[in-house]
Image (cartoon, coloured by chain):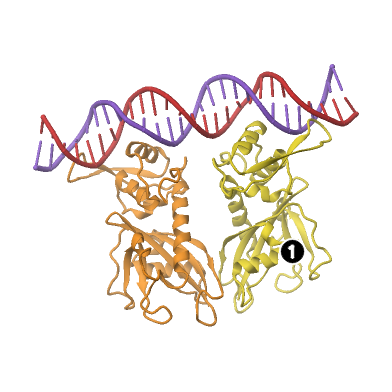
Chain colours: A yellow, B orange, C purple, D red
Amino acid sequence: MFTADLVILTIRDGALCLLVVERGNEPFLGRFALPGGFLRGDESIEQTAARELSEETGVDAATLYLQQVGVYSRPDRDPRRPRVVTCAHLAIAPDLPLPSAGSDARTARWLPIAEVRTLADGLAFDHDEILRDALELARAELQFRTIATAFCPPEFTISDLREVYERVWGVELDRSNFHRKVTEAEGFVIATGRRRATVNGRPAALFRAGDAATLTPPMMRPRPAAS
Amino acid sequence: MFTADLVILTIRDGALCLLVVERGNEPFLGRFALPGGFLRGDESIEQTAARELSEETGVDAATLYLQQVGVYSRPDRDPRRPRVVTCAHLAIAPDLPLPSAGSDARTARWLPIAEVRTLADGLAFDHDEILRDALELARAELQFRTIATAFCPPEFTISDLREVYERVWGVELDRSNFHRKVTEAEGFVIATGRRRATVNGRPAALFRAGDAATLTPPMMRPRPAAS
DNA sequence: GCAAAAGTGTTGAACGTACACCCATGG
DNA sequence: CCATGGGTGTACGTTCAACACTTTTGC
């Protein structure tokens, strides 16, 4: 038995959130788990993950960021027989409304990462471990790839983008230096010429994602200031 | 069916080499392939990979570098039924004698990477693709982790270490600056106090691997000079 | 005008690169 | 003493971090 599990992250109301589903069957009935599904005979694991992602978020997976995290195969990770090997994936999405009444009746919801840690028994299966690894990967990838734009809507401000880094890394960044790095890096963001009216202060220029995949020079994460 | 395949790299006679086995069965009879083996019911994929690695190299896998590369699951990647999903691993070893007469009678050999590209039909299955991804991973990891010492014997010179970077990256590095970076990075190399007599010139100081896993500051790869 | 948020300029420290130079050994 | 490879010093350019400063809006 081989599955693809998904760590789908987004930023909602200034907090880094994870998409979880409440389990409707044993084992772990009623507990939160990562969404996932079985590999079908006619598809690759990438296709399985993309299919699950679009089912859960309601948008075409081709527009979202999706990447393998790793394989989790401990013989006792799933009490079922035969045991289930899973390939965990990291997905990044902008703030989306969940297709509540769609597909199956499972209750999917966005859970702030901080609340995941306060769950009495944690996530189902070994999903706490998977989440930890996926978060570490996301934090590392933010440094060298332009994936931060995947958290943002099609048009966004530099402050929106900075908030992504700050929420995922859990640090505060210098506004001025961030602005320069981002706008000077080639192919990271492209000015649209439009502006967004703000409740207070000068209107911010709007950008859209560029076509570069890698971020040069990299955006280095500050030293172990906050964990 | 779930397997672990291994991309085992080393440096022999100044060339980056890959451990390949000649297939003794169909499909791909007589072609070169990556070593690998099936996941057993009582082990994790990490244990499968470590077991295969020690069988092929003859040394305890705990002393070598071993890391997941990714899952390869295209339905047509293996003509057998049911299809085989594999989790590719990258392993790094010092120059080792192969246990030629050991274990099973498969003919394992070190093949220079340059020669892999000249094989008429390439490697068996999708192993060309796996090798490409594993090499890219190794090249990237050299920048931020201290894995280069895994290519070296227990005691090595700075020049040995520099050759690792040069052979894996395919570039030439400045001798002086490399020496400084490596010796000043904390926990990368530790001087043993001994020296190695050379055929020519001043004897080089011998070092052993330090205990740091990450390399700070990183050893940045030169711009796209050579591919 | 004032508060607030966006955006620009400046400066000193840290780092990378290039290359000149000295050191230790065998022949 | 010379060739050869190991190792150090130095000078310059680039990048980074900190923070002062200017711009543009709503009220």
| Left or right of B54, for residue C10 | right
Query: B68 or B139: which is nearer to us?
Result: B139
In the picture, residue C16 is in which quadrant? Answer: top left
x and y, in percent, of residue C11 in the image? 56, 19
Query: Looking at numbered disc 1 in the image, what kind of residue is underneath it?
Result: Glu
| Left or right of A198, for residue C10 | left
Q: Looking at the image, which residue is at 81% across and 36% down?
A: A198
* Mark 1 Cα-neighbour bin, 10 Å: few <14, some 14–19, many ≥20: many
Q: Looking at the image, which residue is at 50% across and 79% down?
A: B79
The mark total stands at 1
x and y, in percent, of residue C12 in the image? 52, 21
In the picture, residue D6 is in which quadrant? Answer: top left
Query: B53 or B25: which is nearer to us?
Result: B25
Q: Is residue A33 visible?
A: no
Using the image, name the chain to which the residue with label 1 belongs.
A
x and y, in percent, of residue A120 in the image? 72, 59
B108 above or below B169?
below
Quadrant holding the C terminus of chain A: top right
Quadrant holding the N terminus of chain A: bottom right
x and y, in percent, of residue A196 in the image? 79, 38
In the picture, residue A22 is in which quadrant? Answer: bottom right
A188 above or below B57?
above
Q: Is residue B110 visible?
A: yes
| Left or right of B132, for residue A42 | right
Q: SS class of the residue under badge 1?
A: helix
B200 above or below C15?
below
Which residue is label 1 attached to?
A: A56
